[in-house]
Amino acid sequence: KEYPSFSCYLLINYRAFAWWPPHLLSVLTFPQQMRGLNFAHNNFTHTVVDDVDFMRNPIIEIVKNLGVSNVKGLTNGKELVEFFITCVEEKKRINLIILDVVMPVMSGIEALRQIRKMDSDVPVVLFTGYNEKAVKEALTLGVKDFLNKPIIEEQVKKVLRKYL
C-alpha cells in the first residue's frame, strides 16, 4: 500500500546543529537553501584568549569538559584578530570568544573593536579582573557576560552553558 508523503521545513538556527554527530546530520534532509552548509564539528570553534597560561588553560579544559572538542587557545588580541580573519576566509564560524582585557601586543578591547567590524553577532564573554573603563566599553561593543578572575569553575560553567 502506498502512503502519501509530505515535507515539513523548520526555520532553524544553524548553531543548533553545530554539535550534532556527523552520522546523524547525514540522515537529515535540508531544503535547497541550506544544502552545502557544513555542520561538521571542525567548522565551529570556541576561542579562549588570555596571555597567562595558568588562566587560559583551565578555561579551555572546562569548555572541553562541557562537550566542546574544538577549542583554540590564543595569547593576545592580535592573534585573535588574525585567527578570526582566517576563520572568515575559510568559512569557519567562531561560536564563542572568551576574552581577557589586559594583554601584550593588543588588548582584548581593541581586538573586540576590530572583530565587531567583521561580525557584530559573535558572542563574547569578557574574562578579566574588574576594570570599570573596560567593562563600560565592552558593554557598548555588545559583551553580554563577564567572568571574574580568579576563575571559579561553577561560575564559568554557568556562563558558558548559555552559549553551548
Image (spheres, rainbow, N blue to C red):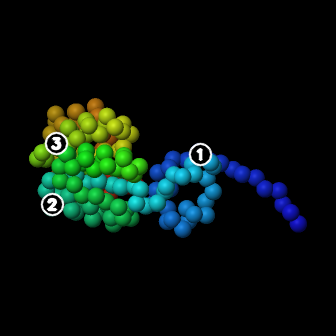
Q: What residue is drawn where x is 16% and y is 42%?
A: 107
The location of residue 112, given as percent across then percent down, is 25, 40
Left or right side of 136 for 40: right
Q: Quadrant of the N terminus?
A: bottom right
Question: Which mark's residue is nearer the viewer, 1 or 2?
Answer: 1
Q: CA distance from mark 2 to mark 3?
A: 16 Å
Which secondary structure lies at badge 1?
Answer: helix
Q: CA distance from mark 1 to mark 2?
A: 43 Å
Q: For the image shown, how many numbered marks are present on the structure?
A: 3
Left or right side of 110 for 36: right
Q: Of marks 1 and 2, which one's residue comes earlier in the chain?
A: 1
Q: Quadrant of residue 64?
A: bottom left
Q: CA distance from mark 3 to mark 1?
A: 39 Å
Q: What residue is drawn where x is 15% and y is 60%?
A: 53
Kind of residue indicated by mark 1:
Gln
Which secondary structure lies at badge 2?
Answer: helix
Kind of residue indicated by mark 2:
Asp
Residue 154 is at least partly visible in this image:
no
Label 2: few (<14), some or many (≥20) within 10 Å?
few
Which secondary structure lies at badge 3?
Answer: loop
Residue 122 is at least partly visible in this image:
yes
Label 1: few (<14), some or many (≥20) within 10 Å?
few
Question: Which mark's residue is nearer the viewer, 3 or 1?
Answer: 1
Q: Which residue is mark 2?
A: 53
Work out whether 112 lies above or below 87.
above
Q: Which residue is mark 3?
A: 107
Q: Quadrant of the C terminus?
A: bottom left
Q: Which residue is mark 1?
A: 33
- Between 113 and 62, the one nearer to me in the picture: 113
